[in-house]
Each structure stands twice: as C-alpha cells, then as structure tokens.
Amino acid sequence: MKLTLTILPGDGIGPEVTAEALKALQAIGQRFGHLIETQSALIGGAALDALGIPLPDETIKTCENSDAVLLGAIGGPRWDRNPPALKPESGLLGIRKALGNYANLRPARIFTALKGASTLKPEVIEGVDLLIVRELTGGIYFGKPRGFAGGGATDGNLHDSAHKVIEVKDAVVGFNTEIYSVGEIERIVRMAIELARSRRRRICSVDKANVLESSQLWRHVAARLAATCPDVQFTFMYVDNCAMQLVANPAQFDVIVTSNLFGDILSDEAAMLTGSIGMLPSACVGGRVPLFEPVHGSAPDIAGQNLANPLAAILSVAMMFQYTFHLSEEARTLERAVESVLAEGFRTRDLLSSSVPGITRVSCNEMGDRVVNGIMQS
Ligand code: IPM
Ligand code: MG
C-alpha cells in the first residue's frame, strides 16, 4: 500500500512526539511493505511565528491532499494573550472543521504494566476499556452568537452588541452559545452505534438534559435512534453523574457519546484512569481526511528537553492503521510493541511517581527507539 501522510508537529512537545511517531510509522511501513510518504506543514504557534496566522491555507491544502494527518500539539504561554482568532487553538479547531471531522474518538484502556500508575486503586480500574465519542465540529465551541459585549448588553440586545468587536479588556459580559441540530446529533450517535457494534455493544449518551435545551434535543434524538437498534444497549446519564461514575466505577462504560465540551472534559478525566494523559491517542474522523492526535497538550514546561511521553502519538498512529486503513495487523503490532516496552519496565517521566525496582526511566526518543525495536523484532 502507498500512503501519503501530512504531519503537523505544532508547538511545545508536538515536534518531539510526532518525530517518534514517525519513526514507529516508518518501521511499520518497512515491516509490512507499505510505502509511506510524509510531508509536514505549519499549524498553531509555529504558523503564527512564521506567517502570522494559526492555520495557513497552504496547510489545509496539504492536509486535503493526503490520506491522513498526524498532529502533535498546539499552544503555549507565548501566544496566550493573542486575540481569539490569533490563538494557536483556533488553528486546531479550524483544521478539524476544515476537514469536516465531526467525530473525535478517544479510547482509554489500561495497559497491564501501568496498573500501578493510575491514581485510582487497581481494583477500580480493573477491566477499564472505554471509548469516548466526542462531537467535534459543533456545540458551544462553534455556536453563534459568541463574543464580548459592553456595559449596555442585556439579554435583549446581546445580538446587536455581538457584532461590535470588543476586546476582553473592555468587556462587561462574555457569551457563547451551545447549539445542536438534529442532523448533527444523529450523525454522531450513528457513528457511536457503529463503533459499539465492534465492541461490547453498550452506549452511554451523556448530556445535561435536566438543565439545557440543547441536551434535551440530544437525548430525544439519541433515544429515537436507540429504539431502532435493539442490538445495542443504550443508557443515558447526566454529565455531572458521568464525571463521578468515571472515577467510581469506570469499568461500567463501553462507548460514551457526548457533545464537544462534555467530551473535552470527560476525556481528560478518562485519560487519568490510565495513569497519564501521555498515553491517550485520538482520532478525528467523519470528514474528508481523518486527523490523528494525542489527547495531551503541548506541555511547554517540558518542551525541547526530550522528556515527553511519545506513546499517545505512537498509539494515534495505531488508530490510523485501524480506523482509516483497516490494517488491523499493523495496528496490533504497534500496540503490542508499546505493551512490551512497558512490560519490560521502560517509562517516561510522566509515568513514574517514584523510583521503583525494575523500572528504567527513558527519554522521549529512547522510548521511540524501543518501540521501533519492538516492531522490527515482532
Ligand atoms: C483537546 C484540546 C483542545 C479542545 C484545545 C487545545 C482547543 O483541549 O483536543 O482536547 O478543547 O478540543
Ligand atoms: Mg481537551
């Protein structure tokens, strides 16, 4: 197979973890006889520094002309004071939207070797294997009206004042809109149903229907689809309860389907079940070209020091093989290589609470090298 991939290294630890993921990718290519061509493009703070915008058209074009995209991370304190449209984050949101990827798949499962790394008791995380299906191109992240308004703004004239560009420093109110259409809810719930069918056939739809109209519609539409799928068991949960259940009894979940904002929050929480957010891969799918990215951020505090955990980026490549190229053997080989490196006791800094006998601390690129060895020896 010939695959063309766009790499968006981004900011902070992004370039370091994507470099390791690329090594693992090329090792899989060699081992299974795939020709993998890669090209890279600018996004986020890196694009702001070079070109003054977080998502250049050239980057969108490069992504559109590839089979898949791998993104590192974006953001950092240097750009935090920029106005919203010139923050690195708007580059990330923009590329998800430009590629039409409305579904973000965020799995969390426990690696046997990392049971001790979780802050939860081993018996609580035993058997955790869940998939968060987060809506990605709608909801409060994109809803309009949004903005800042001045002192005259009341509920009645918010729409008018939203058109005036007011900076945060002059604002008296800030506002956003949570909005979902039937079509947006249907397509994400359908995607969750398909995914549940290849898993344990259970879906928990998470909302805040006791307070929000957008959630009431979400629940209504999800329940209507649930009634047409007797082979999948549906449950409904309020997001506050779900946040609690995720730490109280996380093994009860199979697929969780939820909105953009709730999915953002719950997936960080789910990540910690595994011991480190540095372990969690993700896939943004449903559009023209899928995009894969680790769930973690750009970690500016450890950037450029070869300390980052590249496993989430490497596991994102495994998701790419699984979900996009339907090459399960390649995906499993990558995952097994990660499992065996962990089983042999190698850990990046984030996975070490204190020095434990039999555990060796490794740098970002040593971890990558060890995964590559694992792939080549399998
Ligand atoms: C994530 C991140 C992003 C999001 C930020 C960086 C815009 O938190 O991918 O979870 O909120 O989607
Ligand atoms: Mg997040």
Image (spheres, rainbow, N blue to C red):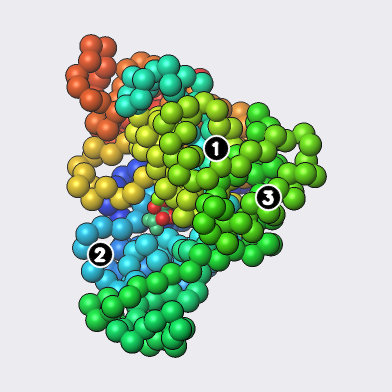
Q: Can residue 164 be seen in the rendering of this structure?
A: yes
Residue picked out by circle 2: 80
Rate crowding at label 2 as few (under 14), some (14 to 19) or many (20 or more) other CA atoms within 10 Å: some
Disc 2, SS: loop
Quadrant into which the N terminus falls: top right
**Residue 222 - label:** 3
Residue 73 image offset from top left, x and y in percent: 36, 52
Look at the numbered discs 1 and 2 and tell me whether their residues touch, using CB distance below 8 Å: no
Residue picked out by circle 1: 131
Residue 375's place in the image compared with 309, above or below, is above
Q: Can residue 27 be seen in the rendering of this structure?
A: no
Q: Is residue 76 left or right of residue 263?
A: left
Q: Is residue 151 left or right of residue 233?
A: left
Residue 212 image offset from top left, x and y in percent: 53, 59
Residue 239's place in the image compared with 52, above or below, is above
- Mark toward the start of the polypeptide (2 vs 3): 2
Look at the numbered discs 3 and 1 and tell me whether their residues touch, using CB distance below 8 Å: no
- Mark toward the start of the polypeptide (3 vs 1): 1
